[in-house]
DNA sequence: ACCTGAACACCGTTCAAGT
DNA sequence: ACCTGAACACCGTTCAAGT
């Protein structure tokens, strides 16, 4: 009779209730983030993640009922990481440049998110949330240096300026130059 | 013996060399444009187009060796249509607003193009071509109203501003307001 | 030159079943 | 609660073959 230590049919446990749930979610999100940041939406594949983790695809579907939910959760994770870090410098332009650089790291993600928002309600809602959050954040930064009746349109223009560079092939320095110039012009009295 | 007029097995001719080649390409491109403009890259499917035209998928692959080539050709077609129409008004701001509106009609396409450029060399090259073309066009428009040493950065900022609105959920009027304000500020001496 | 048929390797998603 | 296995309907792409 075969020794219990010899397991040729199931080298991987079929179930892992002993592991912490958050830890398992974390594994999935980490794998998703890696793919998403490096290669955009096209690189995010549920099947591929399951393969890497040695799971069946349905193991992922247990935690995230659809790919869009995984996408939203991953974006949330990334944004939280960014927000945890605080920008250096006190001048508005420094803060804006800092955010522009942080966001630029995830430019393909930003684009991918908008692509999916056309089809998925979950993604559209999330994108709207992030947009208003970003708008309010920047409005707070500009409140002291821009006349009140111009804050909204200025904020919208600055955000468009920054995000617009995501669609171009900018180097780090080129983007900084354009954003700096644009910001100074847009916030002139 | 069966009458030659009864054809139960092949109601559609298996080949159509009698049709003009350009006309067949046109059919494919029209179908592709329809999907691309309405639903972005996700809605562009070679299989789906072939289904609509009553062809095998390989019939499409005969004219376009890969999906990326079909995408580029469709974008070319759309851009040519836009460029064929001339903007009204002589002031720079009128021209910019006109272009912003035209481009906005194909915002999902612009985003989809950038998404694919990360993976496909064909798309990347096309995107770069369009970008330089647009840059030169706008530089010509601004040459008379902006100091020479500022033209490049101003053009880059204006393009980023316009394209940045494609990533937001703007109505026609909101976009016009933001672009108008942004353009006036960016081109101030 | 032009097109079909069939296959390949990949998706996201779902159902039924197991522990 | 958690996970597997198998299937479904869809992709883009390729090969071999037909006219």
Image (tube, coloured by chain):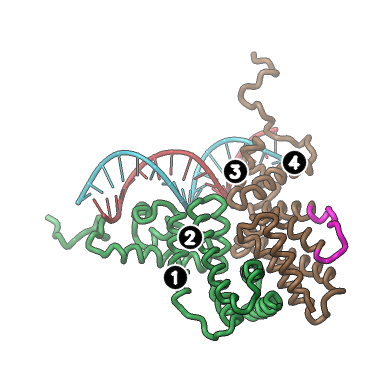
Chain colours: A green, B brown, C cyan, D red
Q: Residue furthest left?
A: A1
Which mark's residue is nearer the viewer, 1 or 4? 1
Residue at figure coordinates x 78%, y 74% from the top left = B187
Q: Where does label 3 land, which residue?
A: B47
How crowded pointer 3 is (Cα within 10 Å; few <14, some 14-19, many 20+) is rated as: few
Q: Position of residue A10 (x, y in %)?
A: 25, 56
Question: Gap in Å between the C-alphas at discs 1 and 2?
Answer: 20 Å
Q: Is residue B110 magenta?
A: no
- Dot 3 falls on which chain? B
**Span shown in magenta:** B82-93
Dot 2 and dot 4 residues touching (CB under 8 Å): no
How crowded pointer 4 is (Cα within 10 Å; few <14, some 14-19, many 20+) is rated as: some
Q: Where does label 1 land, which residue?
A: A80
- Which structural element holds mark 1? helix
Question: Gap in Å between the C-alphas at discs 1 and 3?
Answer: 40 Å
Q: Nearer the viewer, residue A128 or A115?
A: A128
Question: Gap in Å between the C-alphas at discs 4 and 3?
Answer: 16 Å
Which mark's residue is nearer the viewer, 2 or 4? 2
Which mark's residue is nearer the viewer, 3 or 2? 2
* Residue A42 seen in this snapshot: no
Q: Quadrant of the N terminus of chain B?
A: top right
- Dot 2 falls on which chain? A
| Mark identifier at residue B24 | 4
- Which structural element holds mark 4? helix
| Mark identifier at residue A44 | 2
- Which structural element holds mark 3? helix
Q: Are marks 3 and 2 on the same chain?
A: no
């Amino acid at each position: 009779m075969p020794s219990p230590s010899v397991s040729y049919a199931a080298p991987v446990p079929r179930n892992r209730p002993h592991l912490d749930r958050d830890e398992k979610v974390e594994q999935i999100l980490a794998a998703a983030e890696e793919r998403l940041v490096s290669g955009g939406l096209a690189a995010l594949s549920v099947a591929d993640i399951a393969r890497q983790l040695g799971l069946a695809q349905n193991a992922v579907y247990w935690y995230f009922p659809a790919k869009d939910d995984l996408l939203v959760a991953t974006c949330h994770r990334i944004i939280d990481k960014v927000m945890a870090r605080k920008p250096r410098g006190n001048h508005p332009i420094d803060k804006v440049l800092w955010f522009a650089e942080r966001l630029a790291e995830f430019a393909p993600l930003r684009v991918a998110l908008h692509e999916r928002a056309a089809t998925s309600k979950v993604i559209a809602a999330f994108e709207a949330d992030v947009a208003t959050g970003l708008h309010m954040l920047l409005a707070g930064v500009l409140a002291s240096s821009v006349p009140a009746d111009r804050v909204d349109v200025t904020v919208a223009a600055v955000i468009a300026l920054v995000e617009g560079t995501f669609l171009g092939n900018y180097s780090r320095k080129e983007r900084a130059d354009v954003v700096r110039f644009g910001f100074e012009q847009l916030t002139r009295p």
